[in-house]
Structure formats: C-alpha cells, structure tokens
C-alpha cells in the first residue's frame, strides 16, 4: 500500500487540515516518500497568483516514465500494466506487462530520437485508442519531448491549428481507426491538415486497419519497421520538475485553441495521489476509465495516474453501443473490472436502453464507480447506482478540468458519504471557495457562487502555450489572488459542493467542453452568414445541446433555409468536428446586444430553453425589440 492512502473519514479531515495549515509540508512528504527522483527540490512551492506564476518542486530532477514503469519492474515486471480491448469483440484483447511496456516504450523512445526528436520538441499524436497511443505518449515523456495528443475525432483544420500553435515537429498517426461499425481515415485527415503545417518534418504511421494510404516520400514512415530495428535499451532523459510534460488543447472564449501546459513533477505527484485516493485502488485491481486519451481524463486516469501506482489500466477502442448496448457491461465482466469511470452522457444514453442489456451481467467485480465531465443529474445518478453499482459501489462524482490536471472535488469511496448530484468535498490540498459578484468570499450555504481555488496545488496547469497573458486573464484576473474555474457551484450545510455548470461561454455537450466562440467563427466563415451566436440548452442525453442563432447576409436570405442549415453544420464538422454540430438553428434578423456591443447570451439561453418567463433586466439592450422577434420566430 502506498504511503499516501487515506483510510477513514477522520484521517481525511486530519490530512485536509494539515494540507491547509502547511501545504508545503504536506506535499513535501507525499512527494519524497512515493516517487523516484534523480534529485530532490530546493523549494516545495513558489508562486505569485497575481502573475499566474507557479512552480512546484523547483530544481528537482525526475522522469515521469521512470516512475510509471521502471521502478515497478523489480517487484511487478510480470504484472499486467495495460489491457487493450479492441473495438470488435471478436478480435483478441491484449495484455501488456510492465516488462513489456518498458521494452516497447524504450524502443519507441529510440525511434523518436533516431527521427531527430529532442527534449523540448513538440510531437502531435493523433491516434485511435490503441496501445500505440499510450506507448508513443510515454515515449515522448521518456525523452523529454512535449506530447500534444489531439483527440482523433477532430477535423483536419482543428488538428492543423493545434499543430501550428505549438509548432509540432512530428505527427504520429495511424492509417485509420475503428469506431463501432465505421472506419475512420485518420491518415487522410492528417494529410489534409499538413498541407498547412510547415513545422512538421516527419509523420510516423501505425498500421491499424490495413488500408492503403498515401505515404509522402521523405516525410511519412511506417512505424513497425522502425520499431523492429530499434534497440530496447533507452536511458530516460533527466527532466527538470518544471519542464513541460505535455500540451493539451481546450476550448476558450476566443476561436484560438488554448494549449494548456502541464509540467513534470507537480502533475506526476498530483495524478498519482488523486488516483490512489479517489478510486481506492488496491493491488491487483483492474481499473477502467472509458474516456479517450485525447482528453485530460485519459491522460491522468488511463495513463499517468494508474501507471504511477503500478495499476492495471484498460484501454478500450470501441463505443458503448457496438455491437450493442451491452458492450460496457460485457467488458467489465470479461476483464473483471473493479473500478469503472465514465461520463454522465454515456450513463444517460445507456439508461435509455432496455435493462436486458445490463441485467445479463452480474458486474459483481465492481467496487467503485465514477462520473466525470459534467454534472450528473439525479435520475442518471440513481440508475448508475442501482444498475451498475448494484447499490453497493460508491459513486465518485469527480469535479475537475483540463486546467487542473487532476481531480479537485470528489468523495473518497467508502469514506465520504455520497449525495446524488454532489461532488462533495475538496481533496486534501484543495482550498475551494465560492465568490459572489462583488468578489467577496461567500460564507453562507445554499448560495450559488463562482468556484475558485485560493492556493495552488501541484497539478495545476502552468500556462497557455505561447500566451501567458491569456492564461493570467482567463483564470487569475476575475478574482484576484485566486484561480477561477469558470464553473458555478453551491455549497450545502455540511460543506458539500454541487457544481451547477459553466458561468462563461463554454457549453458542455456530451461531456465535451466546447467554446461557443470557435463554433461561431466557423459559422461566420460560411459565405451566406453575417453573424451568429451559440448557446447551450438542456438535452436528455447529451446534457446540453447547441442552439445557433444565425443572421444571414442578403445572399443567404434568398436561399433554402433547410439546405443552409445543413451546410452550416457541415461547415462546423469540417472546421471543428462533428461533436460541435448544432441541434437547432434559428435564422434571425438581429441579436440582442448591449450598448457596448456584447451579445446578451443570457436572453438567448432562455429562448433556447423555451423559458420566456423572465428575461431579467433588458434595459441595457441597444435593440430590445429583437427579443420579441426572436421569441416569436422560434419554431
Ligand atoms: C468542465 C471541464 C476534467 C474532466 C473532463 C472534462 C465540467 C467536469 C464535472 C463534475 C459537474 C463537471 C465543468 C468543468 N465538469 N467534471 N463532476 N460535475 N461538472 O474536462 O473538458 O476541461 O471540462 O467540465 O464544467 O469546468 P474539461
């Protein structure tokens, strides 16, 4: 058992208090007792919240893959590190032991070096959920290259803008991918993206679907023959605690992707600690997180958190609905999964289907079940509790963000009494506060406020790639001295937090964080469109869906609106990806704007929700008459 495991409620309170009273001492002990360092730190933490400058374990030397892999080899080299479950249940699953992972990551690291990738270079990884995704990501970390994993559902132009933003030198992709009964042409998407990416010198291609793809001479290389030639002897690069480990893009309030930068030591300590405690991982447990490694959930809780704890982690290539809606339950049964971590949108989609799909499977191996990505509504919580957890598995409703690196608020299983729709209590080290509009801390309970954290924790992102000012402005300026999450929350009488949703221009659709601005930019690029505004509205399965209000140019006015709506959605698919498609489009002649030209989204949100009861104060509107028009024009 690791030395940072909390075993009862009293201990949680004791640890929490210690972590607030003396955060330095608290994290110093965890870091020094549980990891392998080349050299320890001079200072545990150094920060200036006003400047958004944060350093943890400064001057320490470490390599995260030594901690994920090498240090486990002596005792558990033959333990399974990764179970790969393919999209098609008829294809064999694979087990990769820690010894094999060590060998494969070392070989891959040597391939990267032989292709001229050095410490600090950025490598874009655009792969389906196959073992190579984990191996290439870890290989980057091993040699100190900064990985930028881009979810393989993004379009060519979305990948291109991410590659260009961080000037990636290499792209790693596959010929294609399987997703349910479809195949996806990943190499084709990369070829299209790369027509516009001057920084990319080489592309490594994994053969996943045996399709014939175009290989550009001098640029594209099949990975398998390179691996075959590579030695499996690789010395991990010695990294500074604050050297960037990876960049992961998330949505923001402008169209430009926001490359969140996570650094090495703090992220390592925080994901390891939270994985152990939030999931109550015990030796020989099988852990399965259904997210994609292309999102932070996958980085922290498929890859790094589990491997840092020497756990067995499942990588699932498929989808919950293929070949039918029992796929998740079948995988849990097949691999004897003990901890299962998924998203409310998946739970709602599966709860809609017949109970026959789940009742065939006893799911008796499950001990802890988790939820992440958006608020889980009461109905879905109960379905999850009754039918998946059999009323015996605690549900950990984990609140966190790409920016936070790891989970910040969550029950500890078998320790914190759960309460439907509540993420409950902050983890040790997390000083959560609610702020009112006057920027004062809310002391009362049952009031909604802006959720902020007033002291840094090791896993917090350090900057936005190439734009520190934007990092400062987005997270540290609304409430000086504090990290502002962008979420609203409520605190109950015992101090439990309930996340109420975003208070900014981000909409969570099926658990995907979508900025409205980039979608509006994409729509506005359509030749017939003059202007647009996107808001979210409640949706039974997706949590929220997108509603677009679109003003047409004169040329557009003459066109068939149904076709135009289709074209707009195709446009969004091409620019961002199918996940950002609009469920509803309404063509309008104007948008409600304040005198300073800001769209009053609050009103559009109400219209989209079909709630015309109270639009609040509209006196600052430049064009109040438009509200009536939009309301009446709603189909
Ligand atoms: C946003 C962050 C980090 C995990 C995946 C999403 C929402 C996340 C919860 C939860 C209510 C949640 C928040 C947050 N969110 N978890 N348990 N309850 N809302 O990462 O894409 O960076 O999105 O997801 O609104 O700000 P992300």
Image (spheres, helix red, strand yellow):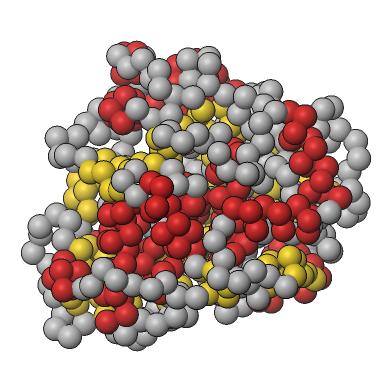
Residue 205: quadrant of the picture:
bottom left
> What's the residue at 34%, 43% (across, down)?
79
Q: Specify the quadrant that holds the N terminus.
A: top right
Query: Residue lying furthest front in this view?
Result: 74
From the viewer's side, name the closer residue of 14 and 509: 14
Does residue 329 appear to the left or right of 536 in the view shown? left
Residue 477 in the image: above or below residue 589 = below
Does residue 19 appear to the left or right of 263 in the view shown? right
The location of residue 272, given as percent across then percent down, is 56, 50
> What's the residue at 60%, 56% (across, down)?
269
Residue 440 in the image: above or below residue 489 = below
From the viewer's side, name the closer residue of 456 and 65: 65
> What's the residue at 89%, 43% (across, down)?
442
Residue 468 in the image: above or below residue 13 = below
The location of residue 351, given as percent across then percent down, is 42, 22
From the viewer's side, name the closer residue of 228 and 419: 228
Does residue 443 appear to the left or right of 157 in the view shown? right
Residue 581 in the image: above or below residue 142 = above
The location of residue 8, given as percent across then percent down, is 70, 28
Number of on-image labels? 0
> What's the residue at 16%, 39% (across, down)?
92
The location of residue 612, given as percent across then percent down, is 68, 35
| Residue 141 visible in the picture | yes
| Residue 624 visible in the picture | no
Does residue 157 appear to the left or right of 269 in the view shown? left
């Amino acid at each position: 058992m690791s030395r940072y495991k909390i075993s009862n409620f009293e201990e949680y309170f004791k640890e929490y208090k210690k972590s607030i009273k003396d955060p330095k001492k608290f994290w110093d002990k965890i870091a020094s007792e549980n990891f392998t360092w080349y050299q320890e730190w001079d200072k545990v933490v150094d920060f200036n919240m006003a400047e958004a400058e944060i350093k943890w374990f400064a001057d320490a030397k470490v390599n995260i893959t030594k901690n994920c892999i090498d240090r486990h080899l002596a005792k558990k080299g033959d333990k399974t590190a990764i179970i790969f479950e393919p999209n098609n249940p008829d294809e064999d699953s694979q087990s990769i032991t820690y010894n094999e992972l060590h060998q494969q990551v070392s070989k891959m690291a040597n391939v990267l070096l032989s292709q001229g990738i050095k410490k600090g270079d950025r490598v874009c990884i655009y792969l389906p959920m196959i073992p190579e995704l984990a191996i290439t990501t870890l290989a980057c970390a091993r040699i100190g290259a900064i990985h930028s994993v881009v979810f393989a559902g993004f379009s060519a132009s979305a990948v291109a803008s991410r590659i260009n933003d961080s000037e990636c030198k290499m792209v790693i992709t596959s010929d294609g991918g399987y997703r349910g009964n479809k195949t996806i042409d990943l190499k084709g998407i990369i070829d299209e993206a790369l027509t516009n990416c001057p920084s990319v010198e080489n592309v490594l291609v994994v053969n996943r679907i045996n399709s014939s793809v175009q290989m550009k001479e001098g640029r594209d290389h099949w990975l398998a023959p390179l691996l075959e030639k590579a030695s499996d002897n690789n010395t991990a690069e010695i990294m500074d605690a604050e050297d960037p480990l990876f960049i992961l893009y998330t949505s923001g309030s402008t169209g430009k992707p926001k490359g969140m930068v996570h650094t090495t030591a703090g992220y390592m300590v925080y994901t390891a600690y939270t994985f152990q405690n939030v999931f109550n991982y015990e030796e020989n447990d099988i852990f399965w997180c259904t997210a994609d490694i292309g999102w932070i959930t996958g980085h922290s809780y498929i890859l790094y958190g589990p491997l840092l704890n020497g756990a067995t982690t499942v990588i699932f290539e498929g989808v919950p609905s293929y070949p039918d809606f029992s796929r998740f339950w079948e995988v849990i049964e097949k691999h004897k999964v003990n901890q299962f971590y998924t998203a409310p949108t998946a739970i709602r989609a599966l709860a809609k289907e017949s109970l026959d799909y789940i009742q065939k499977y006893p799911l008796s191996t499950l001990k802890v079940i988790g939820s992440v990505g958006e608020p889980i509504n009461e109905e879905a919580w109960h379905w999850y509790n009754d039918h998946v957890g059999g009323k015996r598995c605690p549900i950990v409703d984990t609140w966190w963000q790409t920016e936070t690196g790891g989970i910040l608020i969550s029950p500890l299983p078998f320790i914190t009494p759960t309460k439907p729709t509540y993420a409950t209590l902050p983890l040790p080290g997390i000083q959560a506060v609610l702020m009112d509009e006057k920027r004062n801390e809310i002391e009362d309970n049952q009031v909604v406020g802006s959720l902020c954290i007033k002291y840094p924790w090791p896993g917090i992102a350090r900057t936005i790639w190439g734009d520190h000012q934007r990092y400062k402005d987005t997270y540290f300026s609304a409430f000086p001295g504090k990290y502002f999450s962008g979420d609203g929350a409520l605190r109950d009488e015992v101090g439990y937090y309930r996340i109420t949703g975003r208070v900014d221009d981000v909409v969570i659709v099926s658990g995907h964080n979508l900025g409205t601005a980039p979608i509006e930019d994409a729509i506005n690029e359509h030749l017939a469109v003059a202007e647009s505004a996107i808001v979210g509205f409640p949706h039974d399965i997706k949590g929220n869906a997108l509603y677009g209000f679109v003003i047409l140019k004169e040329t557009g006015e003459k066109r068939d609106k149904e076709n135009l709506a289709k074209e707009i959605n195709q446009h969004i698919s091409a620019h961002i990806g199918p996940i950002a498609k609009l469920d509803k489009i309404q063509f309008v002649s104007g948008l409600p704007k304040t005198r300073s030209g800001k769209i009053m989204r609050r009103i559009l949100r109400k219209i989209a929700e079909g709630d015309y009861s109270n639009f609040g104060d509209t006196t600052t509107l430049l064009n109040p008459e438009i509200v009536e028009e939009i309301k009446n024009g709603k189909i």
